[in-house]
Image (tube, rainbow, N blue to C red):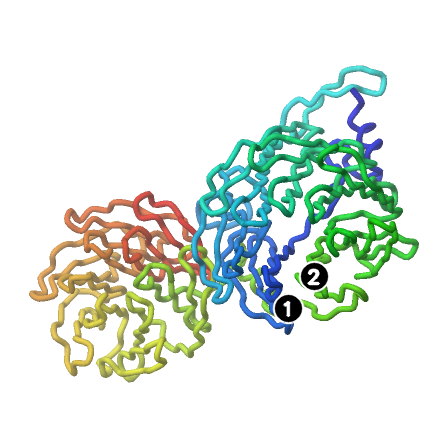
Amino acid sequence: MFSKALLCLLLFVLPASAQLRRTVPQPVKKSPVKVALSPDGQMLAVARSKDRSARVELFSTATGGLHRTIEGFDGPIWSLTFSRDGKSVITVSTEIRDAKIQTSVKDRRQKVIGELKWWDAHSGEFIKKLSLADERVFSLEAAWSPAGDVMALVERYSESYIAPDPYNGAFGQRIMVMGWIQVRDLHLKLLDAQTGQKRVKVEDAQHTYQGQFAYLYGRLEHPVFSPDGQLLAAVSGQEVFVWNVATGKKLLTVKKMMGLPSAITFSPDSSVVAVASVKFKNPGAESEITLWNVSTGKPVNTLKGKSDSIACLQFVAQGRLLLIGSLQYGPEGTKGTMKVWDVRDNRLRVIDVHEGGEEGVSSLTMLPDESAVVVQSGPNVELRETRSGNIIFSFAPSGEDETESMRRSRYVVSANRALAVAFSRDGTTVSAEIPGEGVRRWDARTGGVKERIEREQGSETIAISSDGDVLVEATGSGVILTDLVKGTTDVAVPATGPISALALSPDGKLLAFGSDDEIELWKVGDKAASITISAGQKITAVAIDASGRLVAAAREDRSIGLWDVKTGALQAELRKHENVVNALAFSPDGKTLASGGDDRTAILWDIPSGKSKRTLKGHDMTVTSLAFSPDGRLLASGSGNTAVVLWIVESGKIDRILR
C-alpha cells in the first residue's frame, strides 16, 4: 500500500502548503447555478444557490426578460427540470431545518433533508413536494428520463470522526496517527418521478468509502439517460457505469481513460456513449473524449485535448457534432470555452466564452431548433448563437441577489419585529406586519416569500384578521381597518383614548381592544362598545375565540385572564410567564390558548383545565405575535429578526422559520 502522501502526489500536484492527507482536488468545480430548458425551448429556468438561500428565475428565451422568480428554499438546489408538458418546474434541493432558532454561530442545531418540489411554471406557485433523503444527506443530484416518468437520484451522505488512522511510512514501517476519518455513503436510485417510489434496484450503485478512499474514489455523479430512456450512465469512482433502466442491471463499465471521468452524454440513437476524462497537471490539465459503442463496449473514436478541463458534453445535429464545454489553460491565464467536434470528419472548432477567472463552461443546452445554445459558466448564463458564439441574451441575476442572501442569513440580527401574524383560510399562506416594510407573505409549505405589500405604518398596536386580508391598527383617530386586498381604509372605532392591545374575532365581526385596565368589545361598524370588562390592570394583549363567547387578556403582572363575553365574568386565570405577555391566540377549536412574551417563550394552555400543556422555547428575542393555522396543526409566532417561526403544535418542534 502506498503512503497517502505519495498516492496524492501521483494523482495530483498540490502546493507545498496543502494538507496532502486530507485534501484532493475535485475534477470538476461544482457550480451553484443550474439551468433547465422547457420542452418547447421558450422558457429557461435558472436556479441560483448561495448559503441557505436559493431561488429559480424563469426567463423568456425569445426576449431575454425575467418572467417569474420562485422562492421557497432553505438550502441549495442541486437539479431542476421542466415537466413533459412544460407547465411545471421540478426541483431537487436539500433543505436545512433548524431544530431551534440560532442565537450564535456555535448554536447550530439543524437537520438536512432532501425534497422534490413541483412549481407552476407560469405563476410560480408551489404545487406539491416529496421527501427524498434522510437527515444525513449533504448533497443530491438528479436526472429525468426523456419521458419524464423515471428519475435517477444520487444521494451523498458524509460523516467525519476522529480515530487512529494507520498508513505505511517511507520505509515500510506501520505508522498510527490520530486524525479525521471521512466516511462517504453514495447511493444511486431509480425512482418513479411522480411518487418517489423505487422502480428497480440498481446493480452496484451503493458504495461506502472511508479515509483516503472517500476522497479518491468517493464519486457517484453525472447521471444521464439515453434519448430512448432505456439506458442510464453515471460516474462511479474512477469509472463510468451504464445500466439497463428497466432491470437495473449493469451493462457496461468504462475503465480505460486517461484520467478521472468528468462528463457523459449519449448519441441521439442511444448506441454510443461519449465519456470525457481529465488528467490534472501542474499547472492545468489535459482532457480526452472517447466514444464507446454501448453494445460492444469498444471505443469508436477519440479526441485528445491539451491544456483544458472538460465539464460537459452534448450531441447535436443528429449526432454528427458534439458540443464540449471546458476550462482552457493558456500562457495568459484561463478562459471558458465551447468547442464543436465533428465526430465524422474529426474537425474541431473552438469558441472562447469567458476569458480570465477560474470558471469553465459547466453546462450547454441546445434550443430545439438548434439555432442557439444556453451556455452556463460560473454565475453567467447566456444564450449564444450556435455558429458564431455571439451573445444573444445574458440572463443576469436579479438585483436583490445579495440582499436576499443577507436577509435569509440566520446570524443577521435586526430589531424589526413581526407585530401581527395570520394564516390564510386555506392555511397555505402566512402574513406578517413588519415595521418599516409593510406586510410580508410567505408560502407556509415552502417558506418562500410570495408577496410584499408596502404601506406606511405609524402605530405598533396592530392586529391582523384570521385570513390575513384585513389589518387593524390603533391611530390617533381611532381603530382603522385596512383591506389589504381592496386597498380601502375605514374607521371601525372612533378615538376613545390610548389603546394598548387589539384583536379581531375570526369572523371579523367583533373587535376587542385594551384601553388602560379595561377590555372594550365592539361590533364592527357600531358607534359604541357592546360591553366593557374591567381587567384590574393595564392590558398588554387580547384575543377572541372562534365562538365569540370568550375573550382572553394579558395583564401587566404577566397573568392572563379569560372572561365570558356576554356576562363579563372572569372564568380563569393563567400564570407561568416570567415577563410581559405581548401576544395571545385561540386555536380554531377553542380548546387551546397560545401566549407569548418578553421571556422569549410561547406557552400552550389547555383552556378546560387552565393548565399549561407545552412551552415552546428557542426565540432569541421577544415574542410579539401569534396565530394558529386553520387546522390547528401549526402555530406561527412572530419575533425579532423579522422572523416568523412555525411550530408543530402536537410535538412542540419547529417546522420551519420564515424570514
Q: Nearer the viewer, residue 627 or 441?
A: 441
Q: Nearer the viewer, residue 409 or 151?
A: 151
Q: Nearer the viewer, residue 101 or 278?
A: 278
Residue 647 visible in the current orientation: yes
At mark 2, the secondary structure is strand
Q: Position of residue 230 (x, y in %)?
A: 60, 41
What residue did someone put label 2 on? 374
- The residue at 80%/24% (across/down) is 3
Task: Classify residue 38 by image quadrant.
Answer: bottom right
At mark 1, the secondary structure is loop
Which amino acid does the dot numbered 2 rest on?
Val
Task: Classify residue 214 by image quadrant.
Answer: top right
Q: Alpha carbon of mark 1 to alpha carbon of mark 2: how far?
A: 9 Å
Residue furthest to the right in view is: 331
- The residue at 57%/65% (across/down) is 58
Q: Are marks 1 and 2 in contact (CB under 8 Å)?
A: yes
What residue did someone put label 1 on? 61
Residue 161 visible in the current orientation: no
